[in-house]
Image (cartoon, rainbow, N blue to C red):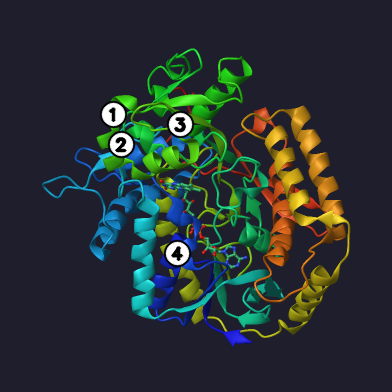
Amino acid sequence: MKRHDVLILGGGLAGASAARVAHQAGADVAIVSKLSPLRSHTVAAAGGINAALAAGDTWEGHAFDTIKGSDFLADQDSVEILCREAPNLIVEMDHLGTPFSRDESGTLFNRPFGGMRQARAFFAGDRTGLALMQTAWEQLVKAGVTLYEEWAATSLIVENGRFSGLIAYRIADGTLEEFQGKAVVVCTGPGGQMYLKSTNAVTCTGDGTALAFRAGCALKDMEFVQFHPTSLHGPNILITEAARGEGGILKNAKGERFMEKYSPKMVDLAPRDIVSRSIQTEANEGRAFPGGYVHLDLTHLGAARIKERLPEVYQFSTEFAGVDPGKEPIPIEPAQHYIMGGIATNNAGATNVPGIFAAGECACVSLHGANRLGGNALLECIAFGKHAGAAAAAFAKKTAQIAGGEQILQQEDRRVDWLLKTEGGERVEALRLELKQVMWDNVGVFRNEQDMAAALAAVRALRKRYPSIRVGAPGKQFNYALIEAMELRNLLDLSEVIVMPNRDDPNWLKHTLAWWRGDRIELTYEPVRITQWQPQERTY
Ligand SMILES: Cc1cc2nc3c(=O)[nH]c(=O)nc-3n(C[C@H](O)[C@H](O)[C@H](O)COP(=O)(O)OP(=O)(O)OC[C@H]3O[C@@H](n4cnc5c(N)ncnc54)[C@H](O)[C@@H]3O)c2cc1C
């Protein structure tokens, strides 16, 4: 058994930000992470991080764009916090050593991003997430925060309605252990691997979201899934929005700049939901290339500019599509990218279960409503990672540790043992693939009643088949087949929550809350918090 005041589950940008602040507040902090922190999905973030930092920009402008982008379903008091704090957070990261791109005079460069009326995405080439993650990571090494890396959490322990610890599985040797803590900040990141086409890393399986859900935390707005318009056709590697921020143009198979039709004002830089639906409409109406892709044309920028500002776009296009973006357009298609919903928290990162906090992509504060604007996710990780870390440390200070994870540990031990020995006929990877196909075909870029009903029935049927799985590898050392079996359970549970909510137009200005009731999932609703921006028609 291990014991620390504050446990941080996940070592990505949100977890690292939470850990730093909790440590500074004097708490004994430990990070428990399935991956080595520098392999977290944050390092794949490319395009930028938003702040109203340029001359003439205001936090109110940033907030309004974010709220309009969310289709007025974000909580406006939370968005105000994000946008007010953003400029100082960028300056802080700069001072801590993030190598932001700048001009000859030393001023930070910024670029326009979708749905923003002003250029306010700051960047380090197109490796912004990697740069921020390295900075955040260095601070943890410097502070000497304890790290348990390659430990996958399998459950959160709640005793008498309060958090008391978690169980984690050590991937290297199969040790299952209880970690006691007074508070936990769940920072387990994205979970888009239930979709066939996704820009998320294969490790993004929504583990912490599912663990918190099963431990009694409400999940908020899970039906809102973002599809990024420009992933590389085939491997679905993200081609960052920065490519359009730098001047990239979308064209259909007839060579038409089709976004002029769908978004006369913002054209190629309309918000992601609008661009994805436009591409899908072009494909549905027969104006895409065979296989359903369209072109992203950067040729007018020239190879030198692309290599300077978008080195990863250059590399991915040449290596994975065999296309030199300086000479030919890049074949792109929409893919799942981000889940706006997640573990419901207040502005301090607290959930409805005392002692459980959450931050980053797995949380829903809510800042993004029905559609997130590019560049706001990295910002959320730092801003609300810090709030959650501070709140968890304060909570731990005034709380006594409660014991009692022994029973859960035994239960988890039996479950792992069962997974290792079970001889069922269902292969884990085959079930995962079926789930991905169901979700992509039925609840992808467009959702309608009939397909959603089909998806719900299919997901429930897949969940019923889960007890008949077969891991097929009995070993304890680096048994990734076992890890994938545990991940599949999380993906299945979350998929059901994603497909459950029904459309209800008369009552549309609402949040959906999903509750785990063991045998079934229950939905409740709460109003959206509005401060100063009244809902209006969303045209661009
Ligand atoms: C390809 C791509 C590009 C993006 N580009 C941008 C961009 O330019 N700008 C922007 O603002 N946003 C961008 N985003 C979104 C943004 O990067 C993410 O929302 C954000 O980085 C998530 O950070 P996080 O700390 O919440 O999660 P992560 O960085 O994914 O970290 C999650 C951590 O949780 C740990 N973990 C997971 N499961 C378990 C478990 N069971 N037990 C223990 N630990 C666990 C992992 O080890 C990992 O350390 C992009 C996303 C993608 C996929």
N-terminal of the pair, mark 2 or mark 4, is 4
N-terminal of the pair, mark 1 or mark 4, is 4
Q: Which residue is mark 4?
A: 38
| Dot 3 crowding, Cα within 10 Å, few <14, some 14–19, many 20+ | many
Query: Is the N terminus in the top left, top right, bottom left or bottom right quadrant?
Result: bottom right
**Mark 1 → mark 2, Cα distance in angstroms:** 7 Å
Q: Determine if residue 70 is in view.
A: no
Residue found 37% across the figure and 39% down from its top: 314
Q: Is residue 261 above or below residue 27?
A: above
In this rendering, position of residue 510 left or right of residue 238: right
Callout 4: SS: helix
**Identity, as a three-letter code, of the amino acid under mark 2:** Ile
Q: Which residue is mark 3?
A: 271
Q: Which residue is mark 2?
A: 306
**Mark 1 → mark 4, Cα distance in angstroms:** 32 Å
**Identity, as a three-letter code, of the amino acid under mark 4:** Leu
**Mark 1 → mark 3, Cα distance in angstroms:** 22 Å
Q: Position of residue 180 (x, y in %)?
A: 61, 82
The residue carrying mark 1 has its beta carbon less than 8 Å from ligand 1: no
**Identity, as a three-letter code, of the amino acid under mark 1:** Leu
2 or 4: mark nearer the eye: 2
| Dot 2 crowding, Cα within 10 Å, few <14, some 14–19, many 20+ | many
Callout 1: SS: helix
Check whether the beta carbons of the residues at disc 1 and disc 2 lie within 8 A of each other: yes
